[in-house]
Amino acid sequence: MNCCLILRRLVREERGAAYAAVEMVLVLGIILLPLLAGIAQLPRWVDAKSTADLAAQEAARQVVLAESLDEGVAAAHAVVVTVVENRGMDVGVLEDVVFEGDLVRGGTVTVTVTLRVPPVVLPGFGPVGGTFGLSRSATERVDDYRQIGE
């Protein structure tokens, strides 16, 4: 009789171990892997944000240092493309560059750079889903004693 009880207990424990293994696979596959994949995307998003920040700062600086607004806008566009390329991104992610303000003594110029970046990139598959716009702005002050060319 004791032998039968021991055998039944072992069979029950083996079933429990099998359920634990199935639960472990489900937890890893359904919860942990997507969570880790999402965490792995964070550096990409931070890199895109810092790229847009740097591009906006450099573009605003180019505008306030230029002889005219047209020259500044052209130089700013060129520097935004250079920053995006130097950061290892495709120029196609650059969606828009918007300029506000004017070259007047003591005035300010604000540049807003918008990048279109995919939310998730899976290795071997590429971008998954659509893209979202990441906009960053920078403002530079025009020097009070600056001579502005006409």
Image (tube, helix red, strand yellow):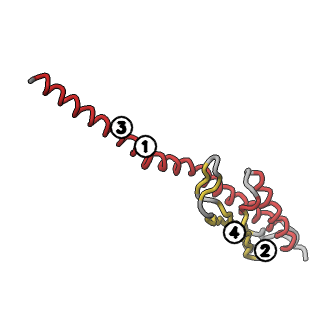
| Disc 2/disc 4 C-alpha distance (Å) | 21 Å
Q: Position of residue 96 (x, y in %)?
A: 72, 69
CA gap, disc 4 and disc 1: 42 Å
Question: Mark 4 belongs to which amino acid?
Answer: Thr
Assign the N terminus to one quadrant of the image.
top left
Instruction: Write down the residue under mark 3.
Output: 21
Identify the element where label 1 is drawn: helix
Residue type at mark 2 is: Arg
Residue 127: image location, x then y, percent = 63, 56
Residue wearing tag 1? 28
Task: Give how far across and how far down residue 49 sits, in percent.
Answer: 63, 58
Real-space CA distance between mark 1 and mark 2, rounded to the nearest whole angstrom? 61 Å
Q: Earlier in the sequence, mark 2 or mark 4?
A: 2
Which numbered mark, 4 or 3, is in the foreground of this view?
Answer: 3
Above/below status of 101 relative to 78: below
Q: Secondary structure at mark 4?
A: strand
- Give the residue at x 40% y 41%: 25
* Image quadrant assignment for residue 76: bottom right
